[in-house]
Image (cartoon, grey):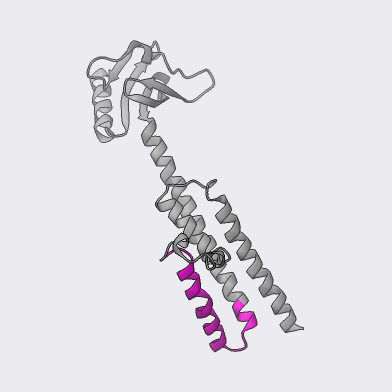
Amino acid sequence: DFSSIQNLVNEEERKHQAHFAYIFATDNEGRVLAHTFKEGIPEKLVGANKILPGRTSSIQLLETKRGLVYDIAVPILTGKGMIGITRVGINEEYIRKTVNNIVGTVIGVTALVMGIGVLIALGLAISTVSQTSQQAIFLSIFILIPSILLSGFIFPIDAMPQYIQPIAYILPFTYFVEIIRGILLKDNDFFVLATDYAVLFGFAVLFTAMSIVRFRKTLG
């Protein structure tokens, strides 16, 4: 009944008040059964988003007094079929922030995986040119410590002497640091960091190819 629907709408609005701009329900004739508007529901909003025949839902971006809102319309179904429509308005800013957080997480995980991949490939390359485990450890320390110091992780590359700066850009760790800094501090997306990703991937391929060539020569 009407009171049950209104209570359900009010409960959902309380749970998601920070994200939902509004919630309301209508019957099949478009009459409003319940809503969360304190000053009355705008008439234009009621007919702004309808479910077309053959569709199970509808989503539209609407401009309201509360800003841009993604209006989601879904049917109210019972054993007798559809008896009405529920409309939920979600703030566009909340959707955008949620998507950005997901994309940022994916970009960060991708950077981490690629960074680990480069280190593994570098380790393989070092192992193929080393005669003993002591040589491999020495070469690893000799490469990794300068990589960290010259990558911009500790000291900005621009603050380094000009004759050292080119060395920083031939180190894979420099591009990994650029990606992490872009994600955490600048909120860059993948396309902005695409060059750094490509360079990291190139280093991984290069080190892996070197390892394969050296390993084949060793077998020969």
On the image, the x and y values in percent for residue 152 come to 45, 63
**Rendered position, 31 above or below 151:** above
On the image, the x and y values in percent for residue 35 come to 28, 20
Magenta span dominant secondary structure: helix
Residue 78 in view here: no
**Rendered position, 48 above or below 66:** above
Task: Give the residue displayed 72% in from the left and 83% down from the top.
Answer: 218
Left or right of 107, for residue 30: left
On the image, the x and y values in percent for residue 179 come to 49, 55
Residue sitting farthest toward the right: 220
Left or right of 152, for residue 213: right
Residue sitting farthest toward the front: 162
Name the quadrant containing residue 10. top left
Task: Give the residue displayed 58% in from the left and 65% down from the top.
Answer: 170
Q: Is residue 136 magenta?
A: yes
Name the quadrant containing residue 29. top left
Residue 174 in view here: yes
Q: Quadrant of the N terminus?
A: top left
Task: Give the residue displayed 40% in from the left and 41% down from the top.
Answer: 98
Left or right of 15, for residue 61: right
Question: Which segment is the magenta one?
Answer: 126-154
**Rendered position, 131 above or below 95:** below
The answer to which of 79 and 163 lies nearer the viewer is 163
Q: Quadrant of the C terminus?
A: bottom right
Q: Is residue 140 magenta?
A: yes
| Total numbered labels | 0
The answer to which of 38 and 85 lies nearer the viewer is 38
The answer to which of 53 and 162 lies nearer the viewer is 162
On the image, the x and y values in percent for residue 43 come to 34, 11
